Image (cartoon, rainbow, N blue to C red):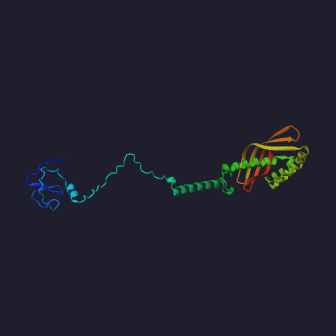
């Protein structure tokens, strides 16, 4: 804290910069201002000591702003920097992710629906691709239901549905069976519904499948409450045609 000291008998204050100067001075040696002649008595007190900064400010000279190198920045209390946008929200990144997923999905779909000549097989020629095996079992169940099921009400349509899933060679065998079974179904008003209860692959190559089927055949007669169930085991041989399996042979087991 600055202190005040009384002015000497030969001292006075500059009215412009407040510096202590000689009482007889007509020009301030500090601010170079011309001093007016005054008859007023000088106040016998010395002002607080002033720094060079105060002198420049009083004289109208601006003080240059201090330059701080490597000054650390202190954020106010409660300040939170703006959140960085997630890379997943960037449209370019998101587009690339979607494209990669689409390509991966397409590759999987191509593998699962690959034609027979691109399938992986074991050393003995058996196809090991699970989706190919499941396709053979699925078609075997569908084909067996079509071949073994018929009704006196829809006999012609049922025979047409069966011929659609069998080979031309096996169609001759089917025709001989239905030559006998068809008239009996019509005269006795019989309906036979075949249901595959279980199935298992015996062998599976690229264009030939052998499947063991457990088939229940439920026979009913119009007007009769009696139902008859035959439990059959058959071995169905199928060949590949137009991306699906059709029946080429059926043997009782």
Q: In this view of the protein, can residue 173 be seen by the observer?
A: no
Work out which residue is located at the far top of the displayed protein and give it: 226
Residue 171 left/right relative to 55: right
At x 85%, y 41%, the residue is 220
Give the number of callouts: 0
Q: Residue at the far left: name it.
A: 9
Identify the residue at image location x=75%, y=45%: 212
Nearer to the camera, 208 or 74: 74
Task: Confirm whether residue 57 shows in the render.
Answer: yes
Residue 84 place in picture, x, y as percent: 45, 52
Res 227 → quadrant:
top right
Would you place residue 4 above or below residue 60 in this image? above
Is residue 6 positioned above or below 63 on the image? above
> Residue 117 location, x and y as percent?
68, 57
Residue sitting at the far front: 39
- Residue 216: image location, x then y, percent: 79, 41
Image location (x, y in percent) of residue 68 = 29, 55
- Tell me: 1 left or right of 194: left
Residue 216 versus residue 158: which sits nearer the camera? 158
Which quadrant is home to the C terminus?
Answer: top right
Q: Quadrant of residue 219?
A: top right
């Amino acid at each position: 804290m600055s202190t005040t000291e009384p002015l000497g008998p030969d001292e006075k204050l500059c009215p412009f910069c407040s510096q202590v100067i000689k009482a007889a001075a007509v020009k301030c040696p500090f601010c170079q201002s011309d001093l007016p002649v005054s008859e007023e008595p000088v106040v016998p007190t010395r002002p607080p000591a002033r720094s060079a900064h105060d002198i420049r400010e009083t004289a109208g000279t601006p003080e240059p702003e201090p330059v701080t190198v490597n000054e650390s920045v202190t954020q106010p209390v409660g300040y939170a920097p703006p959140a960085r946008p997630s890379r997943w929200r960037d449209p370019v990144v998101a587009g690339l992710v979607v494209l990669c997923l689409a390509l991966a999905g397409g590759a999987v779909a191509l593998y699962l629906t690959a034609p027979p000549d691109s399938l992986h097989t074991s050393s003995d020629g058996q196809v090991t691709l699970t989706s190919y095996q499941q396709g053979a079992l699925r078609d075997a169940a569908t084909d067996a239901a079509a071949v073994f099921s018929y009704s006196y009400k829809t006999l012609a349509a049922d025979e047409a549905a069966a011929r659609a899933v069998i080979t031309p060679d096996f169609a001759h065998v089917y025709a001989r069976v239905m030559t006998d079974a068809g008239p009996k179904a019509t005269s006795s008003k019989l309906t036979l519904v075949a249901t595959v209860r279980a199935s298992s692959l015996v062998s599976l190559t690229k264009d030939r499948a052998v499947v063991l089927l457990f088939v229940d055949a439920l026979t009913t007669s119009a007007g009769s409450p009696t139902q008859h169930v035959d439990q059959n085991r058959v071995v169905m041989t199928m060949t590949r045609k137009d991306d699906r399996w059709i029946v080429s042979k059926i043997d009782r087991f």
